[in-house]
Structure formats: structure tokens, C-alpha cells
Image (spheres, rainbow, N blue to C red):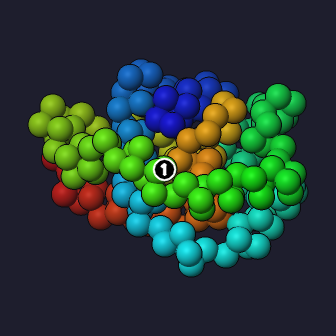
Amino acid sequence: MEHNQGHIWETRMLEARKPYPLHGTAVGCSTGYYLRMYEYFKKINIKNLDKEKAKNRILNRDSFRNKVVHCFGEEWLSVLEKSNKCLNLNEEDFERHYNSIVNNWDKIVKALDFLPTWDEYREICKKFRQPIHAEDIGIPNDLLKHTLPYSTFYRDRYDFVFVMNILGVIEEITDMTLKDYQKEKQNWF
């Protein structure tokens, strides 16, 4: 995820003719956001989700596309839509993905449990004086807000952000993560 987001940031900043961070810096910064999102992800109570709401969110083509276009821009998204199956889900695809996630929830969470915590990652970054806030590496907050939930669609891959999109919880988890980062900003360095 963080690698995808780094590429998206670079591309969008180039399009805007603005300076962009080195790829490794972007990936390192992005890693913290996704680690925090994962901590919220693994606390999801899978039994309390609204499947119909999640389905309507991702299958309402116009509404969903309007959200994703902010991540990639119109031209780039149009190219991705031609080859990316995950951007072109139908009801059968959604049902298959959703049911597979629910039926394998414990395995999914366990498979990702090797990741460090957000606290551990922040301490490592602090020790080496590495930025963890996107704005500190020149990434505007509005770009960050739009790339966190949708950078999964950069490639046709099955990752935990795609899973959050299928479950319909991505916006809520993104908002909670960004709020945590705002609080953290006051105590950084």
C-alpha cells in the first residue's frame, strides 16, 4: 500500500508541477498511516457490518468513481479502469469478495499480525528523525485524504485497503487515522 501511495503522490505532484519527495521518503511516511489504519482494521466487528450499505457504496459506479477520481485524476483513472478488475466489480464479484472476507476474517487478521504497531513505527521514525506527516514532505492534506482510501486501485491487488473498501469501512477508518495524525502532529519532534 505504502509503495502504491508513494507512486501516486509522485505522479500527482508532477502533474501539479510541484516538488515531490524522494520515493523512499514517501514510502516511509506512508507506512505509518497504513499501520495506524491496520490497527483500526483488525478491531472491526465483522458481525456488525452492513453488507447492503457496503455493496451500494462500491457498486454505485458514479458515486464510487467520483471518490476515486480525486486519488488518481480523471485521465489516469480512465486508463486504470480499462485493466483493473478491482475498479470494475459487479454484484457477483462483490458477493464473492465480501463472503470470502467474512468467512476468513480470523485468517486475514492473523496474516497481517506481523506488522509493527503504529507506536513502534513512530518511535523508530522519531529516533532517526524521519518525517511521518505527509505535509512535512510536501504532500497536501487534500491529496493525502484522497489517496489513503483508494491507492489500492493503483494495481489490481488484494490488500487490506481493498478489503476495507469491500467492507464499506474505508472512509471511517481513514478519518480516524487522520484525526490521530493531527493529534500526533502537536507532539512530533
Name which residue type carries label 1.
Answer: Ile
> What residue is rendered at 62% in x and 26% in y?
11
What residue does disc 1 label?
Answer: 108
Question: Is residue 177 something one can see in this rendering?
Answer: no
Residue 57 at what x, y percent from top left? 76, 64
Q: Residue at x 72, y 48 (%)?
A: 68
Residue most extreme to the left: 127
Mark 1 surroundings within 10 Å by alpha-carbon count, few (fewer than 14), some (14 through 19), many (20 or more): some
| Residue 44 position within the rendered picture, expressed as x and y whole percent measured from the top left | 47, 68
Compared with residue 90, is residue 157 higher up or lower down, i.e. above or below? above
Vertically, is 177 above or below 120? below
Drawn side of residue 148 relative to residue 71, left or right:
left
Look at the image and tell me whether residue 181 can be seen: yes
Question: Circle 1 sits in a helix, a strand or a loop, which is it?
Answer: helix
Q: Is residue 139 above or below residue 4?
A: below
The x, y position of residue 51, in whole percent, is 71, 71
Indicate the position of residue 29 as horizontal and vertical percent values: 37, 37
**Number of numbered discs overlaid on the protein picture:** 1
Please report the residue visible at 77 percent of the width from the left and 65 percent of the height from the top: 55
Residue at left offset 42%, top offset 44%: 111
The answer to whether 41 appears left or right of 154 in the picture is left
Q: Report whether 120 appears left or right of 56.
A: left
Q: Residue furthest bottom?
A: 48
